[in-house]
Amino acid sequence: MPDDQINYDDIPNLTNAQLAEMKRAEHYHPVKKQILARVDADVLAWHKSQGKGYQSRMNAILRGAMLNTK
């Protein structure tokens, strides 16, 4: 059934207090997508020099920039 055909009338609306208490599930992990990206050599070298996990750290920096632009 398409989403626009679902009847939600019997589901109570959440209050602002309920919405404020909601947290993302602890087991939530965004889907990872492999890409080809070009970055300046010195930027990549610096990230790699920080040790294992540099790609995850680069992703965290990009996520922080994304969240701060909302």
Image (cartoon, rainbow, N blue to C red):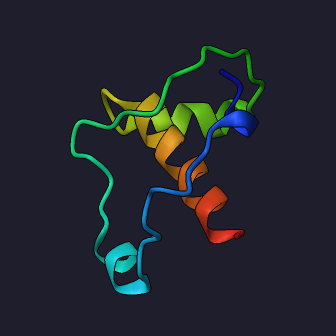
How far from the left and from the top, in percent, is residue 56? 42, 34
How far from the left and from the top, in percent, is residue 40? 75, 34
Foreground residue among 68 and 42: 68
Image height check: is 48 above or below 7? Answer: above
How far from the left and from the top, in percent, is residue 25? 26, 47
Which quadrant is home to the C terminus? bottom right
Could you tell whether 16 is left or right of 3 in the image? left
Name the residue: 74% across, 23% down: 37
Foreground residue among 14 and 23: 14
Name the residue: 61% across, 45% down: 7
Image height check: is 18 above or below 36? Answer: below
Q: How many marks?
A: 0
Which quadrant is home to the N terminus? top right
Name the residue: 28% across, 75% down: 21
Could you tell whether 28 is left or right of 27 in the image? right
How far from the left and from the top, in percent, is residue 36? 73, 15
Quadrant of the rendered structure where residue 44 is?
Answer: top right
Outermost residue to the front: 10
Name the residue: 21% across, 45% down: 26
Could you tell whether 67 is left or right of 69 in the image? left
Foreground residue among 64 and 5: 5
Foreground residue among 5 and 46: 5
Outermost residue to the left: 26
Could you tell whether 12 is left or right of 66 in the image? left
